[in-house]
Image: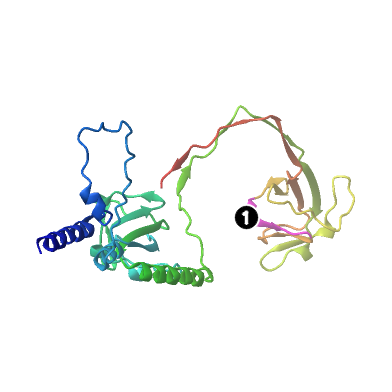
């Protein structure tokens, strides 16, 4: 009975060790290591162990919450030179999502006036309104661009759906007949000055003289009219038409050798009219016509023309 109880006790001890180690046998428990044996000089290789962490639903949910979706909202408008506050009604149509969002939803923004980035101290904005705080106003016809970046936490699946929606919206916007936003620049220039030049002008005036004698038929009730065929030229040849000077010429009328006032006579190609009846028949009338239209000018020495000074205002 004692022998059987000893065997039963050994069997229980072996089963316990087998559960703990899983590799030890009943024989290995019996054999005791000999203390007198020398230790082996060979070193055993270290066992590589890999730590595996199972991803739970809570960790997946935390990873999904860390995904950020960037949304870009722009606002385009053109300044009129007299406005300081711009609203959503001033936007340019057909350029996508064009509005001024709520500042509480915006991560950071950039405002450009005439293509120049403005510091944050120069403006302030609220939902649907952008106001400039500077003493000077945006110049007329200058483009104003405000860009707002909104970073939102979304799930990866919804982020993919939103990117597809944005891509579809971009295709729709590209089909619109949009126009480019151009930079507006105003500048002033000084008048160029020409100096050290020489111009030679040649004047060849044409002088013609005609003589007629007044008869009683030429004197009317209020004026005296001398027809063109009543005149003869300097050679004594009769004429049928009188030359009329251009704006670069003039004519003189001499009655009985006395030069008359210019407002007293009118000359056409067919007649000479004197605004008077106080003239006696047989009085000689001389008509002198001077024409300066045959005038030419030529630059003999090329002038030096200064370059204008250009000042850019905006």
Is residue 81 visible in the rendered image? The answer is: no
Q: Quadrant of residue 65?
A: bottom left
- Residue occupying the far left of the picture: 2
Residue 137 pos. (x, y %): 32, 54
The residue indicated by pointer 1 is 263
Tell me: 99 left or right of 213: left
- Location of the N terminus (image quadrant): bottom left
Tell me: 73 left or right of 311: left
Question: Residue at (33%, 33%) from the top-left corner?
Answer: 42
Please say whether residue 266 is one of the residues in the magenta stretch.
yes
Q: Quadrant of residue 52?
A: bottom left
Nearer to us in this view, 176 or 58: 58
Tell me: 212 left or right of 138: right
Nearer to us in this view, 74 or 92: 74
Nearer to us in this view, 159 or 237: 159
Please say whether residue 209 is one of the residues in the magenta stretch.
no
Tell me: 48 left or right of 300: left
Residue 209 pos. (x, y %): 79, 46
Question: Residue at (39%, 63%) from the top-left corner?
Answer: 77
Residue 83 pos. (x, y %): 32, 61
Secondary structure beneath dot 1 equals: helix
Q: Quadrant of residue 43?
A: top left
Nearer to us in this view, 239 or 45: 45
Graded by Cα atoms within 10 Å as few (under 14), some (14 to 19) or many (20 or more), the crowding at tag 1 reads few
Q: What is the magenta range?
A: 261-269
Is residue 280 visible in the rendered image? The answer is: yes
Residue 243 pos. (x, y %): 79, 53
Q: How is the image coloured?
A: rainbow
Number of callouts in the render? Answer: 1
């Amino acid at each position: 009975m004692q022998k059987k109880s000893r065997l039963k006790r050994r069997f229980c001890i072996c089963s316990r060790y087998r559960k703990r180690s899983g590799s030890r046998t009943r024989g290995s428990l019996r054999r005791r290591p000999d203390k007198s044996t020398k230790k082996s000089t060979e070193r055993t290789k270290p066992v590589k162990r890999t730590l595996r962490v199972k991803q739970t639903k809570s960790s997946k949910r935390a990873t999904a919450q860390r995904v950020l979706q960037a949304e870009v909202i722009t606002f385009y408008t053109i300044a009129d030179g007299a406005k300081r506050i711009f609203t959503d009604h001033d936007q340019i149509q057909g350029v996508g999502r064009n509005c001024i969002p709520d500042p509480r939803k915006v991560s950071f923004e950039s405002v450009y006036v005439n293509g120049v980035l403005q510091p944050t101290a120069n403006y302030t904005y609220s939902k649907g309104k952008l106001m400039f705080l500077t003493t000077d106003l945006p110049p007329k016809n200058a483009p104003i661009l405000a860009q707002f970046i909104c970073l939102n936490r979304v799930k990866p699946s919804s982020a993919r759906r939103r990117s597809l929606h944005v891509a579809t919206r971009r295709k729709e916007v590209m089909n619109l007949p949009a126009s480019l936003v151009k930079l507006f620049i105003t500048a002033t220039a000084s008048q160029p000055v020409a100096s050290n030049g020489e111009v030679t002008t040649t004047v060849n005036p044409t002088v013609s003289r005609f003589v007629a004698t007044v008869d009683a038929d030429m004197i009317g009730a209020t004026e005296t009219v001398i027809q063109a065929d009543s005149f003869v030229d300097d050679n004594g040849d009769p004429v049928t038409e009188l030359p009329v000077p251009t704006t670069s010429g003039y004519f003189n009328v001499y009655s009985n050798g006395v030069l008359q006032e210019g407002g007293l006579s009118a000359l056409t190609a067919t007649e000479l009219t004197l605004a008077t009846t106080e003239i006696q028949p047989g009085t000689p009338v001389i008509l002198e016509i001077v024409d300066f239209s045959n005038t030419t000018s030529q630059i003999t020495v090329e002038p030096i023309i200064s370059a204008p000074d250009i000042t850019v205002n905006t």
